[in-house]
Image (spheres, coloured by chain):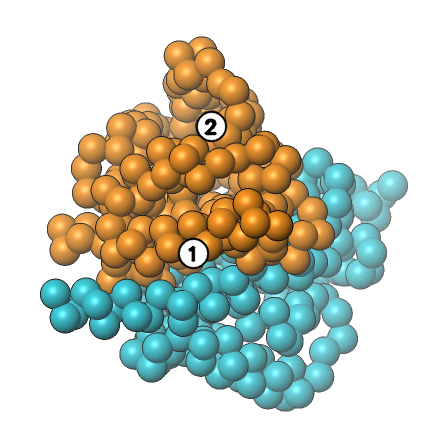
Chain colours: A cyan, B orange
Amino acid sequence: GKADAAETGLVPQWLTFLAEADQLKSIYRASRLIDDSRFENSAEHSWHIMLYAMVLADQAGQDVQIDRVLRMLLIHDIVEIDAGDAPIHGQVDHAAMAAKEEAAAERLFGLLPQNQYQDLHRLWHEFEGAETPDAQFAKSVDRVQTPIANLENGGGSWVEYNVTLEQIDQRVGVPVKRGAPDLWAWLRPQLLAHFDKLQTA
Amino acid sequence: GKADAAETGLVPQWLTFLAEADQLKSIYRASRLIDDSRFENSAEHSWHIMLYAMVLADQAGQDVQIDRVLRMLLIHDIVEIDAGDAPIHGQVDHAAMAAKEEAAAERLFGLLPQNQYQDLHRLWHEFEGAETPDAQFAKSVDRVQTPIANLENGGGSWVEYNVTLEQIDQRVGVPVKRGAPDLWAWLRPQLLAHFDKLQTA
Ligand SMILES: [Ca+2]
């Protein structure tokens, strides 16, 4: 019918966006794979934290809609294609980074038809704002994945960035306590044990 | 409360599964990134086709639940950690591969608590079976991503595997026509043009 034809007319526009998104596979993060073989890229990271969100769903508050969280995590790093990855423990000019990411969101989501641009732009802003229960749980899983990998591989990016437990309490603990408090209650003693061992070593 | 404590007791089990899943980032496919820089791994592939499913949702039948499709695609390749990736145009003993993948699903999803094992094992079987509308749409996006990338990068894995248009009609066309018929109607002429150009070259 007419609607189908009109929709199929959008295929090239959809595919332009999807091809552009392929570049997220070439944005490398400060964190490494658990087997320490190489740096992790933001596309596979996004996949992994979606799996975290689905598997750890019981750790989310009752008002969290996991399927909305999954969609949020699916698109949360796409802005890095233009803006790059800002390592959580690196030195960053936050205002300049926010402006770069906003421009990236407008260009990249702007490749899509207007209604989809609006939906995804709004969803990304909700994630960044970290004020809704969905966004707070999404932020939690985004923040815990690297510490958990670092615990598995002897410190990982903490070593390179000279990260202290106090910094982790601030940059990981604060958001994770908000979005997944029981998970933080479990993780904090593991972190303490790791950093204690470093000091006595 | 008691329930929370019991749930937090599952954290090590969840994290064992999530750490094991990290290995999907080291399973390389026959297909390459669009910029041709390297082979694609199955974790970033899974991320990308979830983005396909969300963006191309209008191409799905009305009885398709995109959020179920996303969950299906999130876990669809995890069995490759044990069973490896079977290139769609390679020579494969399908019965042997199915047995390997079944064992992989039991071991890997079996790392999770029983209720989650059952949910994910069933969801993976539904994907593999390709009989429900959700699974058929999921299969469609899984199958179109590589041809679309190959069209962008001059043939990609078709060249290495000596793939013909007839083979694509069979292995890509049949499932995509079933799950996303308008998308196939759009894609088929592009494929024809690509292979025609090869013959006259
Ligand atoms: Ca696949």
Q: Quadrant of residue B172?
A: top left
**Alpha carbon of mark 1 to alpha carbon of mark 2: how far?**
32 Å
Three-letter code for the amino acid on which mark 1 is drawn? Gln
Q: Is residue B72 visible?
A: no
Q: Position of residue A152 (x, y in %)?
A: 67, 38
Q: Which mark is residue B36?
A: none
Q: Are there few (<14), some (14-19), or many (20+) residues within 10 Å of tag 2?
A: many
Three-letter code for the amino acid on which mark 2 is drawn? Val
Q: Height in image: A64 above or below B172?
A: below
Residue drawn at x 46%, y 54% is B193
Check mark 2 vs ligand 1: CB closer than 8 Å? yes or no. Answer: no
Query: On what subunit does the disc labeled 1 rest?
Result: B
Q: Quadrant of residue B82?
A: top right
Whether labels 1 and 2 belong to a single chain: the reply is: yes
Residue wearing tag 1: B190
Residue drawn at x 27%, y 28% is B129
Q: Are there few (<14), some (14-19), or many (20+) residues within 10 Å of tag 1?
A: some
Q: Is residue B108 visible?
A: yes
Residue wearing tag 2: B79
Q: Secondary structure at mark 1?
A: helix
Q: Position of residue A84 (x, y in %)?
A: 67, 71
Query: On what subunit does the disc labeled 2 rest?
Result: B
